[in-house]
Image (spheres, rainbow, N blue to C red):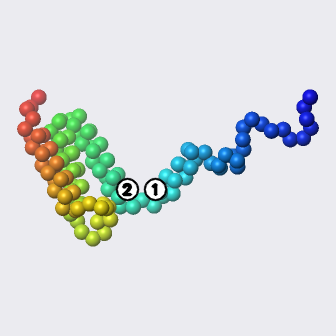
Amino acid sequence: MAKAGKTRTSRASRARTGGRGPISKRWIYWKRRYSNPVRRDWVLLYTLIGIALSCAGALVNVRVGGIMLAATIAAVGLLRIVPSSWQKTWVNRSAATDAVTTLLAAAILVFLTLTLPST
């Protein structure tokens, strides 16, 4: 026989389990984090766009894609050399090391792109 009054369900209420679910918490975090993007976010976005454009260029010709990718890498390396407020984009690293590494990678990529045999 059923009791009169409130019955307890097998599922605990949100108040007792810790509030919002994990997906909701993650959504709130991302919404707050990226509502005001910083320079680092823009650099990442433009780098990803450059990589996507170089992939599209590789569909036209491998050399075009390689040169576009090298240009993207070189742009990131040159951006690392730029002084003042852009220094906040990277932290805890030597600017010279980052710039030399990215420019060297771009030069190697251009060299490999231009020395590939034609197809």
* Residue at left offset 29%, top offset 50%: 47
Write down the residue under mark 2: 41
Mark 2 closeness class: few <14, some 14–19, many ≥20 residues within 10 Å: few
Q: In the rendered structure, which disc, 1 or 2, sits on the residue that comes first in sequence?
A: 1
Q: Is residue 1 above or below residue 68?
A: above
Considering every residue shown, the one lying at the far bottom of the view is: 84
- Relative to 100, say whether 64 is above or below: above
The residue sitting at 19% across, 52% down in the picture is 102
Q: Quadrant of residue 75?
A: bottom left
Residue 9 point in image, percent of width and height? 77, 36
| 32 w.r.t. 111: above or below | below
The residue tagged 1 is 34
Q: Position of residue 24 (x, y in %)?
A: 58, 47
Q: Nearer the viewer, residue 53 or 70?
A: 70
Q: Could you tell me how far apart the alpha carbons at marks 1 and 2 are, in whole angstroms?
A: 8 Å
Query: Residue 12, image x and y in percent?
Result: 72, 41
Where is residue 56? Give x, y as percent.
Answer: 26, 39
Q: Residue visible at 24% across and 55% down?
A: 76
Asked whether, in this view, residue 32 is left or right of residue 8, the answer is left
Drawn side of residue 4 relative to residue 23, left or right: right
Q: On the rendered structure, is 27 left or right of 88? A: right
Q: Which corner quadrant of the image does residue 78 belong to?
A: bottom left
Q: Toward the viewer: 101 or 119? A: 101
- Three-letter code for the amino acid on which mark 1 is drawn: Tyr
Q: Are marks 1 and 2 in contact (CB under 8 Å)?
A: yes
In the rendered image, the quadrant that contains the N terminus is top right
Q: Amino acid at mark 2?
A: Asp
Numbered marks: total: 2
